[in-house]
């Protein structure tokens, strides 16, 4: 949950249903960072960490609040989101799979 420091807000990370499945050995995590009112959160830092290897990938949300990690190895990932004025949001056990 992404929390505004002055008041409670949440982030919406579209992970589970948005995991793109493809043929091959990689997949992707797309998402949109929003607050509890549905307003997008631009320029949020988004970090995806492979739980097995500890390898991390970093990107930032666009002006529309969207982000994507392309060509990630299959496996379980922890996704962290941080933005100025918000507390950090952490989503664990986001499993990427191929052809499931």
Image (cartoon, rainbow, N blue to C red):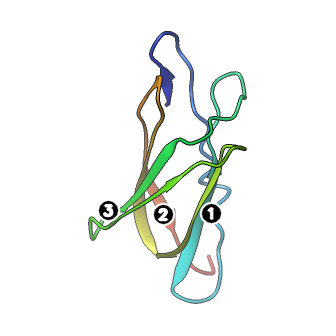
Q: Earlier in the sequence, mark 2 or mark 1?
A: 1
Q: Are marks 1 and 3 in contact (CB under 8 Å)?
A: no
Q: Which of label 3 and label 2 is nearer to you?
A: 3
Q: Position of residue 46 (x, y in %)?
A: 48, 49
Q: Earlier in the sequence, mark 3 or mark 2?
A: 3
Q: Residue furthest top?
A: 6
Task: Residue at 46% x, 29% y: name it.
Answer: 84
Labelled disc at residue 36: none
Q: Residue furthest bottom?
A: 24
Q: Are marks 3 and 2 in contact (CB under 8 Å)?
A: no
**Element at badge 2?**
strand
Q: Which residue is mark 3?
A: 51
Q: Residues within 10 Å of mark 1 (few under 14, many from 20)?
A: some
Q: Which residue is mark 2?
A: 95
Q: Is residue 60 left or right of residue 33?
A: left
**Element at badge 3?**
loop
Q: Which residue is mark 1?
A: 19
Q: Position of residue 30 (x, y in %)?
A: 63, 59
**Element at badge 1?**
loop
Q: CA distance from mark 1 to mark 3?
A: 16 Å
Q: Are marks 2 and 1 in contact (CB under 8 Å)?
A: yes
Q: Position of residue 64 (x, y in %)?
A: 72, 44
Task: Residue at 44% x, 16% y: name it.
Answer: 5
Q: Is residue 48 left or right of residue 15?
A: left
Q: Residue 41 lies in what quarter of the image?
A: top right
Q: CA distance from mark 3 to mark 2?
A: 10 Å
Q: Which residue is at the front of the view, 77 or 84?
A: 84
Q: CA distance from mark 2 to mark 1?
A: 9 Å
Quarter the C terminus occupies = bottom right
Q: Earlier in the sequence, mark 1 or mark 3?
A: 1
Q: Residue 55 lies in what quarter of the image?
A: bottom left
Q: Residues within 10 Å of mark 2 (few under 14, many from 20)?
A: some
């Amino acid at each position: 949950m992404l929390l505004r420091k002055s008041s409670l807000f949440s982030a919406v990370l579209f992970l589970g249903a948005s995991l793109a499945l493809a043929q091959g050995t990689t997949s992707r995590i797309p998402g949109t960072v929003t607050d509890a009112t549905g307003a997008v959160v631009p320029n949020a830092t988004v970090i995806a960490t492979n739980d097995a290897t500890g390898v991390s990938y970093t990107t930032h949300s666009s002006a529309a609040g969207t982000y994507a990690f392309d060509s990630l190895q299959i496996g379980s990932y922890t996704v962290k989101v941080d933005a100025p004025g918000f507390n950090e949001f952490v989503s664990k056990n986001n499993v990427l799979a191929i052809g499931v």
